[in-house]
Amino acid sequence: MEPVNNNNKIRFICIAFLLDHNFRGKQPHLSVIVQSRRLSLFGHIAQMPDETDAKQILTDSPAGNWRKPLGRPRITWMKTIQQDLKSSDLNMDDAVDLAQTRPLWRLMSTFGATHS
């Protein structure tokens, strides 16, 4: 076996990069982990009773006298959730219905996030 030196490390990194290997093994990317946990939290909120504040914030629209602030539209948590659901071909209403069955939602939030 060859001794480990910088040339061998660089050669290994180049070969692994060309073969598209993940250096961390089987661990998913950080963005996939964050998306999965974000969808998991959305599922928890969607499963709450309709009277809770978190569920009302999720489902209600702003008051009629509310005006959009000037400038670039902000990236909100709900817009990010909608983008995550779009990658799984779901809309908000279907996702809330799917979240009522915990095993299906858990499967979708973990498997859907890693394989979209």
Image (cartoon, rainbow, N blue to C red):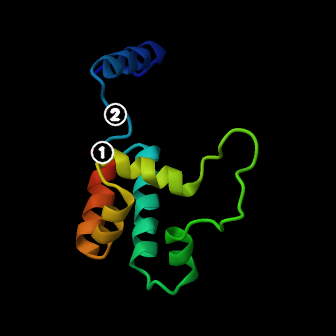
Relative depth, front residue between 116 and 91: 91
Residue drawn at 56 percent across, 66 percent down: 61
Q: Assign a secondary structure to mark 2.
A: loop
Within 10 angstroms of label 1, few (less than 14), some, or many (20 or more) residues?
A: few
- Horizontally, residue 4 falls left or right of residue 111, namely right
The disc label shown at residue 26, or none: 1
Which quarter of the figure is the N terminus placed in?
top left
Q: Residue at x 30, y 70 (%)?
A: 97
Q: Quadrant of residue 54?
A: bottom right
Q: Quadrant of the C terminus?
A: top left
In the displayed structure, 72 sits above or below 68; it is above
Dot 1 amino acid type = Lys
Say which amino acid is labelled 2: Asn
The answer to whether one can see residue 27 in this image is no
Q: Judge by depth and name the residue closer to the eye, 26 or 29.
A: 29
According to the picture, the residue beneath numbered tag 2 turns out to be: 22
Residues at discs 1 and 2 in contact (Cβ within 8 Å): yes
Q: CA distance from mark 1 to mark 2?
A: 8 Å
Sort mark 2 into few (<14), some (14-19) or many (20+) by Cα contacts within 10 Å: few
- Can you give x and y, in whole percent of width and height, for residue 52 in the image? 53, 84
Q: Is residue 54 left or right of residue 5?
A: right
The location of residue 66, given as percent across then percent down, is: 71, 61
Residue occupying the point 44% across, 81% down: 48
- The answer to whether residue 23 is above or below residue 10 is below
Quadrant in the rendering for residue 77 = bottom right
Please name the residue shown 41% across and 73% down the image. 46
Q: Most extreme residue toward the right, as rendered?
A: 70
Q: Position of residue 18 (x, y in %)?
A: 31, 16
Numbered label attached to residue 77: none
Residue 13 against residue 94 in the figure, above or below: above
Q: Residue 92, image x and y in percent?
A: 39, 60
